[in-house]
């Protein structure tokens, strides 16, 4: 389980084992949320379809692209540090953070839109789920950005190298989890009829 | 003991154990009143016995936490406590205020106590668990502030570790959330809403941080496993605790008049609250399995492992049992709640304080690492008697609760409350017997401090170097 730092690139799962325990626990919470959504929707198909169609899917599409791109940037950042290209790695990581920030901005605009129309948690069952799920995920994007931010700060100070960049693998694993959860959330809440 | 000032923990621990005895005695009185309604009436009515039972619990756990912090923080920060004198002064203030409050409960009617303590100037009394007169509450705040000052200054001038930071965050949270006991809105919904910010966010939030840090400290000391490994576990445990526990407050908001989404939020998040407790169990056993040395204080290791298991069962499993809104609709406020409350408080908070006492008391009494074999054997007997009897108390109350739910709620022909109570009386009798066994265990626990004092310390024969 504990590998020497030298074969860190081949480590499976990548990063710290602790983050994987955490990721599994987080996924469990999301899974319960998704399952609750699915069961409730099955009992209120009409209501869900009706209100789902009021959502702005363009916002969500932009956000999906933003998160996928950010994940790609994280992959490039780790690929770069594996060959000791620190400055390139840092640029990719900052790019990923920028994409995360874009997600937060777009999502906030969407929330503001709802708010201006008087739509909130208590509007109906669909919006209860919509706000709960997306806001819980929103907080995870924020948390993931904090972790990537710490990674970037350490990287800037020269804390990572080709031999030792386990922290980046750890942060990257968490970020991919946040991204993937959105890839389930997006069709589930915005698209699926 | 590495630092002289750690010794201030000792009076805190002694007071904690003394109040623990009081709590159990009043528990037994109440337990009997369940089946023998007139017992000790009118001297000690049920509601007073209950108030004393729960208030003593809170106060002794607080004494235990403070003692634990006074022992742990100097050692973790590697310097003497900022002011041992202040710690001792606060000890006496807290003890006297606590004793006067309990006497107040017992000697004068509650309404009279409210009048005597001028509750009308700032009304805070009359709410479950927060029954203390306002003046006592102010005293608690003063003690907590002085305590945090002392601990905080010690931390500032010394080494900062994850264990001590997590503990200080937990203790600060404890003090901050207690402030909501002064917030007493006229609106009954809001009153209950914020009341839970004290009660729930203590036991299912910040106290878990304190629990985690004490457990981590004792495991570092007794297993010799690398601090980095233990700290990593602590990080994910507290992250999961906060993610699930904070919004998990919603499981108290189902039926008090809050918006409907709380039924979803409360159900989903609180259903996940067992996760951090499960992690704690895995963590404790993993660390003990990976131990680099066999610590001679085997009693402390037993308490630590026991805490991890019992906290998971009591807080995690028994909490989950009735946390989902559709289930809670029927079980709310039945003996199932009491079953959960007993095992969770014992398993998580009573046991973690006893773990810390078990680890540190021998050192404060001048031992190098552990008590004599004889003393540890008695202590382990106490552990098993108390723990097993608590399991039985929980099972009997669960049985009572299930029947109560069945006969009184989940039926087309519900019995009235007292009729249902009569039918489950046999469970209350068995619970009372288990309670007596618990008291015997507690007595043995106290005896363990006095036996084998002149015997040599327990030693472990190392089989092979790890």
Image: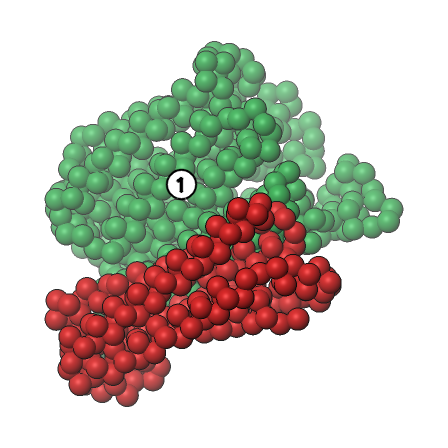
Chain colours: A red, B green
Q: Assess disc 1: are there few (<14), some (14-19) or many (≥20) residues with their C-alpha within 10 Å of its C-alpha.
A: many
Q: Position of residue B10 (x, y in %)?
A: 26, 40
Image coordinates for residue A88, horizontal then vertical, percent: 18, 77
Identify whether A75 is placed above or below B35: below
Q: Quadrant of residue B175?
A: top left
Residue B136 visible somewhere in the drawing:
yes
Q: From the viewer's perspective, tell me whether residue A69 is left or right of residue B84.
A: right
Subunit bearing disc 1: B
Residue B43 drawn at (x, y percent): 59, 20
The residue that disc 1 covers is B61
Residue B59 drawn at (x, y percent): 41, 35
- Whether residue B393 appears in this view of the structure is no
Nearest the viewer among A91 and B328 is: A91
Q: Tell me what residue is drawn at x 69 percent, y 33 percent.
A: B36
Q: Residue at x 15, y 70 (%)?
A: A159
The residue lying at 15 percent from left, 82 percent from top is A84
Q: Secondary structure at mark 1?
A: helix
Q: Residue at x 78, y 51 (%)?
A: B410
Q: Residue furthest right?
A: B413
The number of callouts visible is 1
Residue A20 drawn above or below residue B388 = below
Q: Quadrant of residue B69?
A: top left
Q: Quadrant of the C terminus of chain B?
A: bottom left
Asked if residue A133 lies left or right of residue B152, the reply is right
Does B414 sit left or right of B382 as displayed? right
């Amino acid at each position: 389980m504990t590998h020497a730092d030298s074969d860190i690139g081949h480590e499976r799962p990548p990063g710290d084992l602790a983050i994987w325990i955490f990721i599994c626990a987080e996924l469990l919470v999301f899974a319960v949320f998704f399952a609750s959504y699915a069961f409730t929707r099955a009992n209120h198909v009409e209501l869900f379809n009706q209100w789902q169609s009021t959502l702005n899917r363009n916002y969500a599409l932009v956000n999906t692209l933003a998160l996928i791109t950010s994940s790609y940037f994280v992959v490039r950042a780790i690929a770069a540090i594996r060959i000791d290209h620190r400055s390139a790695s840092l640029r990719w990581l900052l790019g990923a953070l920028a994409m995360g920030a874009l997600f937060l901005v777009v999502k906030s605009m969407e929330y503001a839109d709802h708010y201006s129309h008087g739509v909130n948690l208590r509007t109906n069952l669909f919006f209860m789920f919509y706000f709960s799920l997306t806001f819980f995920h929103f907080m995870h994007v924020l948390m993931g950005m904090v972790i990537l931010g710490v990674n970037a700060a350490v990287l800037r100070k020269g804390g990572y190298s080709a031999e030792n960049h386990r922290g980046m693998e750890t942060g990257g694993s968490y970020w991919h989890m946040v991204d993937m959860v959105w890839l389930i959330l997006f069709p589930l809440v915005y698209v699926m009829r | 003991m590495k630092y002289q000032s750690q010794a201030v923990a000792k009076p805190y621990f002694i007071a904690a154990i003394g109040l623990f005895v009081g709590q159990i005695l009043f528990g037994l009185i109440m337990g009997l009143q369940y089946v023998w309604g007139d017992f000790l009436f009118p001297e000690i009515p049920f509601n007073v016995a209950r108030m004393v039972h729960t208030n003593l619990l809170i106060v002794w756990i607080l004494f235990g936490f403070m003692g634990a912090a006074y022992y742990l923080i100097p050692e973790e920060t590697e310097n003497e406590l900022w002011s041992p004198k202040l710690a001792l002064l606060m000890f006496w203030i807290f003890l006297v205020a606590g004793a006067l409050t309990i006497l107040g409960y017992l000697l004068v009617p509650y309404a009279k106590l409210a009048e005597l303590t001028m509750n009308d100037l700032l009304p805070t009394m009359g709410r479950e668990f927060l029954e203390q007169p306002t003046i006592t509450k102010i005293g608690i705040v003063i003690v907590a502030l002085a305590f945090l000052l002392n601990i905080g200054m010690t931390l500032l001038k010394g080494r900062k570790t994850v264990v001590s930071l997590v503990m200080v965050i937990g203790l600060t949270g404890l003090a901050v959330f207690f402030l909501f006991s002064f917030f007493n809105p006229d609106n009954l919904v809001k009153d209950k809403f914020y009341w839970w910010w004290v009660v729930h966010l203590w036991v299912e939030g910040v106290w878990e941080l304190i629990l985690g840090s004490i457990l981590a400290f004792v495991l570092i000391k007794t297993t010799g496993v690398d601090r980095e490994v233990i700290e990593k576990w602590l990080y994910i445990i507290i992250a999961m605790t906060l993610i699930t526990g904070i919004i998990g407050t919603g499981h108290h908001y189902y039926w008090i008049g809050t918006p409907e989404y709380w039924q979803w939020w409360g159900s989903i998040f609180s259903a996940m609250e067992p996760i951090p407790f499960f992690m704690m169990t895995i963590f404790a056993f993993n660390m003990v399995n990976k131990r680099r040395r066999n610590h001679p204080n085997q009693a402390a290791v037993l308490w630590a492992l026991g805490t991890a298991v019992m906290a998971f069962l009591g807080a995690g499993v028994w909490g989950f049992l009735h946390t989902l809104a559709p289930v809670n609709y029927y079980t709310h406020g039945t003996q199932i709640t009491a079953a959960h409350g007993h095992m969770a408080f014992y398993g998580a908070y009573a046991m973690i304080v006893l773990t810390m006492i078990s680890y540190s008391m021998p050192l404060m009494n001048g031992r190098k690492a552990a008590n004599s074999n004889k003393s540890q054997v008695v202590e382990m007997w106490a552990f098993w008697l108390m723990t097993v009897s608590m399991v039985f108390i929980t099972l009997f109350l669960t049985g009572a609760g299930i029947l109560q739910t069945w006969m009184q709620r989940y039926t087309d022909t519900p019995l009235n409350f007292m009729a249902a109570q009569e039918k489950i009386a046999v469970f209350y009798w068995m619970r009372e017997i288990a309670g007596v066994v618990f008291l015997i265990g507690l007595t043995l626990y106290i005896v363990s401090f006095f036996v084998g004092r002149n015997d040599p310390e327990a030693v472990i024969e190392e089989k092979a170097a790890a």
